[in-house]
Amino acid sequence: MPQEAYVRALPKAEVTPSLYAARYALRAFDTALCKRILDLGCGDAFFEEHYPQRFVGLDVESARLLAAHNRGVGNLILGTGEALPFAAGSFDGILMKDVLEHFYLEQAFVILEAVTRVLAAKGLLVITTTKNVQSFWDKPDHVRPYSNKWVRRVLIEELQYYRLVAERELSGGIRGFGKLHLEWLAHALAHHLGIRNTHGIVVLQKTSSCP
């Protein structure tokens, strides 16, 4: 599917870090020609519902998976990130959107090792991050913030499993710009106005030499 088709298929909504990250991730997967993508922590299964040929969703919340199943979404699996029920190299793309901040440091390392195992050589890993700001702690299920820098340091410098493809820092956006598909302008204005970046996104490619 062409890149433009991915972007048009996303819901028309205001610019938020979550919406912008979703569009950014889809562009990255499309550019890399990823055909089988694991959506780790799929939640309400938006990607699995709209792109069933490419996305497989996994989540620990059975109620949300059941609700998606009742909408006709079939490519969903109940499971945890620490013990992914897939063979090594099963996916050429993995999305971790709004996932890491729900886990403590030790759990995050286990999940990243599991993700690396099921990602094929030269596959793409897209991770969103959340900064240590007050709004982060307002959500009771958030336990630890992770930055783009932390992701790079762990996966590229320390474990040496990946190379950096791209990364972005994201502000909270400006209401209404998403309806016009002017995210780039919204974030440029947010930067000019000094609106603080609260989120990030990192795109990594797995090297052929790692597990």
Image: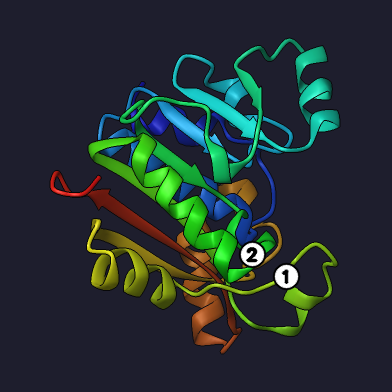
Going by the numbered disc 2, the residue's amino acid type is Glu
Residue in view at x 64 percent, y 70 percent = 172
Q: Residue furthest bottom?
A: 194
Rendered location of residue 2, percent (x, y): 33, 26
Q: Please say if 111 is above or below 144.
A: above
The quarter of the displayed image where residue 78 is located: top right
Foreground residue, 112 or 39?
A: 112
Disc 1 to disc 2: CB gap under 8 Å: yes
Instruction: For mark 1, give the secondary structure.
Output: loop
Crowd tier of the residue under label 2, counting other residues whose Cα lies within 10 Å: few below 14, some 14–19, many 20 or above: many
Q: Which residue was labeled with disc 2?
A: 101
Q: Which residue was labeled with disc 1?
A: 143
Which quarter of the image is occupied by the C terminus? top left
Crowd tier of the residue under label 1, counting other residues whose Cα lies within 10 Å: few below 14, some 14–19, many 20 or above: some
Residue in view at x 57 percent, y 43 percent = 81
Residue in view at x 39 percent, y 61 percent = 202
Q: Please say if 133 is above or below 168.
A: below
Q: Earlier in the sequence, mark 1 or mark 2?
A: 2
Q: Viewed as shown, does residue 182 lie left or right of 140?
A: left
Going by the numbered disc 1, the residue's amino acid type is Val
The quarter of the displayed image where residue 40 is located: top right
Rendered location of residue 181, percent (x, y): 53, 48
Residue in view at x 59 percent, y 84 percent = 196
Mark 1 → mark 2, Cα distance in angstroms: 6 Å
Q: Please say if 13 is above or below 10.
A: below
Foreground residue, 6 or 161?
A: 161
Query: How many labels were placed on the picture?
Result: 2
The quarter of the displayed image where residue 103 is located: bottom right
